[in-house]
Image (spheres, rainbow, N blue to C red):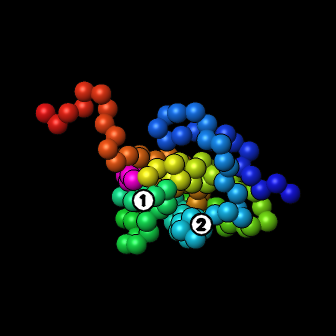
Amino acid sequence: MDHRAAVPQRSPCGGGEMTSSITVQNLRPSEVGFIAAMHHLSFGLFEHLQIRGGELVLTPPPVTVRYVKFGTVATAGKPIDDTLELRQQLAELFGYVREVDSGEIRSLEIRHGLPFAMELELAGERTEGGGRG
């Protein structure tokens, strides 16, 4: 069985597609730990998550903001299982992270235990005309 995510992955800098895909079997320990943290959070945000050398820095732990919605039953995403394909959202998140030498995920929104959207600051990256003033 092929455990590759079926979605093409793009470079975080807006370039073309990345050539390698992320599989369950080649997840890094930090990625497995972060999947568990996302699953436990279920709905919310991780803030100020550092990236160094293409890997998440989990010590100290990132700021966690849990969404609480009243009048509903909370449901979490499915936990990781190395016999299943890696979910598309996870493959895309880790694909982006692995392409970043140094940066910070300002916020990463989690829905149903999976990454939904993020704000990413790349070290040394500036927008044109973006001086401090």
Camera-side residue of 102 and 37:
102
- Assign the magenta stretch its main secondary structure: strand
Residue shown at the point (79%, 65%) measured from the top left:
83
Image position of 52 (left or right of 86):
left
> Which type of secondary structure does the marked residue at label 2 adopt?
loop
Among numbered discs 2 and 1, the one appearing first in the sequence? 2
In the rendered image, residue 39 lying in the magenta stretch gets the answer no
Q: Mark 1 points at which residue?
A: 52
Residue type, label 2: Arg
Image quarter in which the N terminus is found: bottom right
Query: Residue 112 appears in which quarter of the rendering?
Result: bottom right
| Position above or below: 70 against 100 | below
Image position of 56 (left or right of 106):
right
Camera-side residue of 72 and 28:
28
Q: Is residue 74 visible?
A: no
Q: Residue extending furthest right? A: 1
Q: Name the residue under label 2.
A: 28
Image quarter in which the C terminus is found: top left
Residue shown at the point (58%, 39%) measured from the top left:
10
Image coordinates of residue 93 in percent, x first then y, are 55, 51
| Position above or below: 116 against 64 | above
Q: Is residue 113 visible?
A: yes
Residue type, label 1: Arg
Image coordinates of residue 59 in percent, x first then y, are 40, 72
Disc 1: CA contacts within 10 A as few (<14), some (14-19) or many (>=20) = some
> Which type of secondary structure does the marked residue at label 1 adopt?
strand
Residues in magenta, as a range: 102-106
Residue shown at the point (70%, 57%) measured from the top left:
23
